[in-house]
Image (spheres, rainbow, N blue to C red):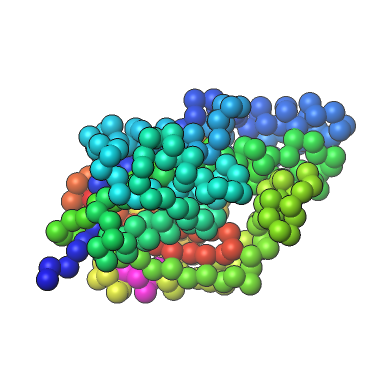
Amino acid sequence: MPRTHARLAGVAVHMPETVRTAPETERRVAAAGTGFSPPPGLVRRLTGVERLHVMPDDWQASDLAAAAARKLLAETGTDPAGIDLLLFAAASQDMIEPATSHMVAAHLGLRCPVFDVKNACNSVLNALETAHALIAQGSYRRILIACGESPSRAVRWSVPDLRTYLASIPGYTLSDAGAALLVEQSAEPGILGFGFTADSRCWNVGTLASGGSANPRGDEHTYFRLDGVGLRRAFEQLGPGILDETLERLGVGWQDMAAVCVHQVSKPYLDELTDRFGLPKDKIAVTVTEHGNAASASLPLQLVRAVESGRAGVGDLVGLVGLAGGISMGMSVIRL
């Protein structure tokens, strides 16, 4: 019996029209009335982020995901009735219950099975792995992955002092974004494989603590908190082993790829990571400076930009490298 394969049939992103610049962020913090004024240009100097996207006040994560999905379905000429499974994949969510995939399906008018895949900024990459496995085992033929990241709702604006501001800076770089990927059954392998690793002892280096059993209520827990030094140290200790092992197992190298997409937290850390892990800088499309940290939508955003720029096209190999709080690291190699 011929083996069933899966391919990436399309990818699309939705970036909200409203843009907030780094100076605008500083002015809003200063206007909160606490008496604290941020040092001018500090966010840009530390992160390289110039601007990011903010969704409309009446939108939710599901709206971002649905907007990207509508664009993808239109671009690929896919009938929504032909979708066999919807996966919502994001660090964000509309609410604790029900799964946000239901809201996305309702927006799109889908009647297929749905469920959420959640693993911080690796959510889309893990959903891609899940879709690949489900198609390979014959459970579904066509799976839609929809991502909606809404971190603007977790930004601290009332800042009393410099120490609190420094701890809050990661939140000022996070961008709202939507992304969608279509994964289909194919006769030839398009998605070549994956590799993942994690060090869950480091789960507390980055948290958004509200809404679960640990902190069901309380405003202080609704803000994103990140220990940047701790996160950097955790990934350094994890090292590039899983990337090297995956490439060797799949029989490819960075030199074989037309583009490499790497989750981008900040420009300085992207530069440091590419040097430390031996990633090809000339094959990475930098998006974090102009679009901010788009969380799990970051990899689809970079892939779309690589295709739009002509860097990658049909038949080319691309690599997706994911980094996420928790912490986890993984990658996928795909032939477009």
Most common secondary structure along the magenta stretch: helix
Where is residue 322? Give x, y as percent. Answer: 45, 58
Q: How many marks?
A: 0
For the point 19% across and 64% down, the residue is 4
Kindly give the residue lying farthest to the left in the view shown.
1
Residue 335 against residue 179 in the figure, above or below: below
Q: In front here: 16 or 319? A: 16
The stretch drawn in magenta includes residue 258? no
Q: Quadrant of residue 131?
A: bottom left
Residue 106 appears anywhere in the view: yes
Q: Quadrant of residue 24?
A: top right
Residue 307 appears anywhere in the view: no
For the point 28% across and 39% down, the residue is 81
Where is residue 194? Give x, y as percent. Answer: 35, 65
Q: Which residues are drawn in magenta?
A: 243-247
Q: In front here: 40 or 122? A: 122
Where is residue 252? Give x, y as percent. Answer: 26, 67
Q: Quadrant of residue 309?
A: top left
For the point 17% across and 68% down, the residue is 3
Residue 279 against residue 311 in the figure, above or below: below
Residue 33 against residue 218 in the figure, above or below: above
Where is residue 103? Give x, y as percent. Answer: 49, 40
